[in-house]
Image: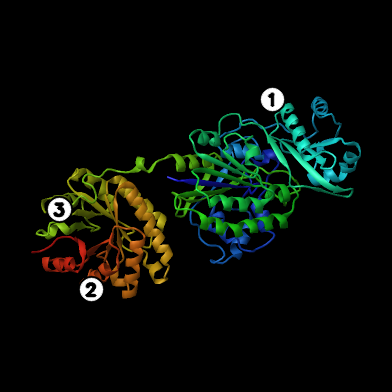
Amino acid sequence: MAQRVFVIVLDSFGIGEAPDASKWNDSGSNTLAAVLSHSNAPLSNLSKMGLFDISGHKDQRILDYISSQTNDTLPSPIGSYGRLYELSNGKDTTIGHWEISGVISPEPLPTYPEGFPQEILDKLSEATGREIICNKPYSGTEVIKDYGDEHCKTGALIVYTSADSVLQIAAHEDVVPVETLYEYCSKARDIMSGLHGVGRIIARPFTGTSGNYTRTDRRHDFSLVPPCDTLLDNLKSKGYDVISVGKIVDIFANKGITESYRTHDNQDGINTLLNIMDTDFNGLCFVNLVDFDMKYGHRNDIPGYRAAIDEFDGALSTIIDKLNEDDLFIITADHGCDPSTASTDHSRECVPLMVYGEGHNSPKNLGSIMGFNYISTLVYNALLLSDVSSAREFIPAANSHVLDENNIMSYVDLTNLKTTAKLSDIYTLIDSAIAQNCASVCIQPCNVRDAYKYANGRLNICTVIGFPNGYNTTACKLYEAEEAINNGASEIDMVINLNYVKDERWDDLEKEIALLSDLCHKYGAILKVIIETCSLTESEIIKMSEIVTSANADFIKTSTGFGSEGATVENVALMSKNIGPDVKVKAAGGIRDISTAKAMIAAGASRIGASGIKY
């Protein structure tokens, strides 16, 4: 269960045409490909978040970029990643953000490719007391160049639109004070409702002199109120913090927001996010970084767009480092705006989904997902689903077995991991283990469900994952472990990745064990970590003992029984000396008689893995 969720929208960062792009005259649009075409400089942190592992990258510009990178500049993902398809009928900021927050818009917002009707202009002129000029689809930078002088001379408002559902009013700050411009836009918002309910009314203040007019950063959006409650409203009503950074507060007409921070540009937005990450809140921090779209996408400025992505990628490392263990971090976009096409408008594209943190701490390809609203589900689940609901009651409990010093078999996980074992052999093993008061039976994953039913609460069921070689990916081991626990295993014996040991990838080893430990403890099971001592040096055994301790596992185990050598008294003693007080030792492999078992216990073992002990 997450304490804090961060959703960052890279405004307009599409990753390739949507299936219905032709309907919007956007066939072939790919914002990501356009940006990558400018430079092969690495985007290592976005790569770490899974950007280049998302399925469906077909544009040759993306493929060329990927092939130009090395393993160091194109690191493997650390979390979940996928491609989102928009369900709503639109390609604008408002509809995109609404869908992210759970609201599907079946009808597009109105656009005005021929300019606004005269009745709208008359109402706007009456409400503001000023004349209206322009009234055409226009580039924001070009419109003040072409109409700025007339505006400054007459005081008439420059009203224009684009291919998006917007009405924009530009005014020089010396002619129309910014606060007055905001009042005009608020009145325009009231006028543009119902049939003419455009997504946004945008105030566009500018400064400068003739031939040198420049838009300022005091833009302000007056958005259409969402048609129903959104993710933000629902979280706020349940007492969660909903923090807006950038134009989120405008997009949602200030609904569902408990705290907001307006920003001047991407860097300001990133800095604001970093400051918020230093605070203790419970809920959602929703961030929009607008420069990608406003400054570069709409101006077909590929170098500028690429520089902005480089800036974000550089900051991403710090953002990831600031995440708490129970945070969830999501990166996505709201539409595309391909700067390499002739159009300067938004493009109907798929958007990336990159997720890291609570519940998403190992690589997972989510594939293609219909609906940006999948993000709202991720947020709801992270904040509202309690871990208590997933805890499993094991009968008997995993740690309920009582050791009997007068009965060596009470220390034993009675084991049958033969590839030829029949289910009847497993039942016989269970009967024998119960009769001898064994700690558990250790069996193949495929037999856990049947074994759990047969034991019927009389015995703990143990199984192995990543067995016997340990070189499965972390995601595979997590899946194996969760399935085994759901099938009834209350004890999990996991084999470490020996390849990582030999490469001294200690952080990766600790992360893997910690993830599995957290998973097991979440469900009420215990984790035993098999380090295969026969393949390790003394220093490696010591290091793994320390890592198993810091990763919060319950046991460290000597061997799979499939290696070149099983447990030795010397290795058990070495492990016992270097583990923490909350970790126990399981000796396994080659223990067949009572004297060997007693020697292992004397050396520090609390469990013995054996197919049987001869007296």
In the rendered structure, find residue 194 and report the number of the disc placed on it: 1
Question: Earlier along the polypeptide chain: callout 3 or callout 1?
Answer: 1
The residue depicted at 40 percent of the width and 57 percent of the height is: 474
What amino acid type should be assigned to the residue bearing mark 1? Gly
Q: In this orientation, does residue 574 appear? A: yes
Q: Name the secondary structure under disc 1.
A: helix
| Distance of label 2 from label 1 (alpha carbons) | 81 Å
Question: Earlier along the polypeptide chain: callout 2 or callout 1?
Answer: 1
Q: Name the secondary structure under disc 3.
A: helix
- Foreground residue, 2 or 365? 2
What amino acid type should be assigned to the residue bearing mark 2? Glu
Q: Which picture quadrant has residue 147?
A: top right
User: Can you say which quadrant of the picture contains the C terminus?
Assistant: bottom left
Q: Residue under label 3, please give it.
A: 433
Image location (x, y in percent) of residue 509: 39, 63
Question: Does residue 46 sit above or below 105 in this rendering?
Answer: below
| Distance of label 2 from label 3 (alpha carbons) | 28 Å
Q: Mark 3 vs mark 1: give the one in front.
A: 1
Q: Residues within 10 Å of mark 1 (few under 14, many from 20)?
A: few
Q: Residues within 10 Å of mark 3 (few under 14, many from 20)?
A: many
Q: In this orientation, does residue 162 appear? A: no
What amino acid type should be assigned to the residue bearing mark 3? Ala
The residue depicted at 20 percent of the width and 53 percent of the height is: 440
Q: Residue under label 2, please give it.
A: 570
- Asked whether, in this view, residue 541 is left or right of residue 196, the answer is left
